[in-house]
Image: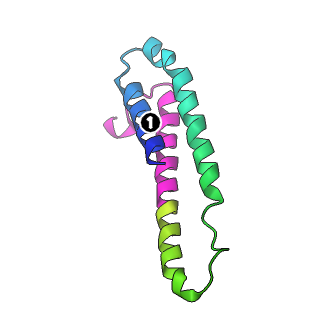
Amino acid sequence: MQNRMRDMQAMHDKMMNAKTPAERQALMNEHMKTMQEGMATMNDMKGMGGMSGMSGMKEMPMEMAKRHQMMEARMDMMQTMMEMMMQRMPGAATSPASK
């Protein structure tokens, strides 16, 4: 998961450093592959958060902490993917905060 986030961040940096629309377009295949891999990772994580194997209440706090950590990681990945999608939109070279 952390490797996937690192890959997505590297792709984000490449897109942000592209100076021309032509450079950005050249990165699109790699960008789409990164996005698809991120979605696959998120789908794999979706089924991992259950507490079906819990044998007693003593395990609950640890299970909840683990589940919370996974949910945070998934949310981080979703945010990164949304940022990457926003980069693909026309006029994405400038962020809304800079306008």
Q: Is residue 86 magenta?
A: yes
Q: Is residue 21 above or below residue 50?
A: above
Counting labels gives 1
| Residue at x-position 65% and y-position 74% | 53
Asked whether the viewer can see residue 93, the reply is no
The residue nearer to you, when weighing 20 against 30, is: 30
Q: Is residue 24 above or below residue 11?
A: above
| Residue at x-position 63% and y-position 51% | 44
- Secondary structure of the residue carrying numbered label 1: helix
Q: Is residue 14 magenta?
A: no
| Residue at x-position 53% and y-position 68% | 67
Asked whether the viewer can see residue 91, the reply is yes
Q: Is residue 5 left or right of residue 35?
A: left
| Residue at x-position 54% and y-position 81% | 60
Seen as rendered, the residue at the extreme bottom is 57
In the rendered structure, which amino acid carries the disc numbered 1? Asp
Highlighted range, magenta: 72-99
| Quadrant of the image containing the C terminus | top left
Which picture quadrant has residue 94?
top left
The residue nearer to you, when weighing 94 against 46, is: 46
Task: Provide the major secondary structure of the magenta segment.
Answer: helix
Is the residue marked by circle 1 packed among few (<14), some (14-19), or many (20+) residues within 10 Å? some
The colour mode here is: rainbow
Q: Is residue 17 left or right of residue 52?
A: left
**To which residue does mark 1 refer?**
7
